[in-house]
Amino acid sequence: MTNHQQPTTSPRLNEALDLLYAVGPSESSTTRAQVKLREALAVAQARDVFYDLLPSSPIGAVLVAMNVRGVIAVGFGITERAFVAAVQRKTGAVVTRSPQKAAAALRQLREYLTGKRVAFDLPVDLSLQTNFQQQVLFAAREIPRGEIATYTDIARRIGRPKAARAVGQVLRQNPVPIVIPCHRVLAADGSLRGYLGGGTKTKAWLLKLEGARAG
């Protein structure tokens, strides 16, 4: 698979552009121009997306995509081509394979799935999600390892006690599963319901790995 990487900016370029704007007519207009320029550069850098894959793990191949802000997608039970296409569709970015840039995230995922790590230390970028989706996902991220919650529990935690069904829909589309542990959220009757990638079998395996569920 061949991808084309977009050029990125550097602090040195930022400084040069600052000097260029500094010759403007007034200090206030120069400051405003510099602020707008930095905002535009930040957006452009966030659009550069990189990915790589872990060819094998206890749940099969695992893929991860990220930008300068953090991890934006984790995939398993999906082909590399389908994963890249989905990330491109959601972000509108050119997605470039970069083992170097994705190395830390894949290392932590590998360690977690093999029982050598109990928690993630990874930044996550949910800026493409709505405010409600972010609330649900961050609430799910707060569920401790070895514990479980229900969709209703999450709805209550975000102040939307009647939104259990909507919570379930958000978690079924969690862009960064495992890192944000939506597998720890069950139905009110304790059933596993659906799960991304490997289905309920994978969900049960993850819970067993964490000591939350025996079967």
Image: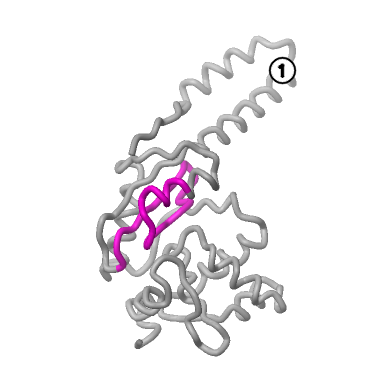
Q: Does the magenta segment cover residue 99? A: no
Q: How many marks?
A: 1
Q: Would you say 5 lies left or right of 187 here?
A: left
Query: Callout 1 environment at 10 Å: few (<14), some (14 to 19), or many (20+)?
Result: few
Q: Inspect the image, locate mark 1, and give the three-letter code of the amino acid beneath it.
A: Glu
Q: Residue at x 54, y 63 (%)?
A: 173
The picture places residue 212, in percent across and down from the top left corner, at: 40, 83
Give the colour scheme shown: one colour
The picture places residue 11, in percent across and down from the top left corner, at: 47, 26
Q: Which residues are magenta?
A: 59-85
Q: Secondary structure at mark 1?
A: helix
In the displayed structure, 49 sits above or below 207; it is above
In the displayed structure, 133 sits above or below 28; it is below
Q: Nearer the viewer, residue 206 or 172?
A: 172
Q: Residue at x 33, y 39 (%)?
A: 1
The picture places residue 41, in percent across and down from the top left corner, at: 56, 30
Instruction: Identify the image quadrant of residue 112.
Output: bottom left
Q: Which residue is mark 1?
A: 27
Q: Residue at x 69, y 19 (%)?
A: 30
Q: Nearer the viewer, residue 30 or 10?
A: 10
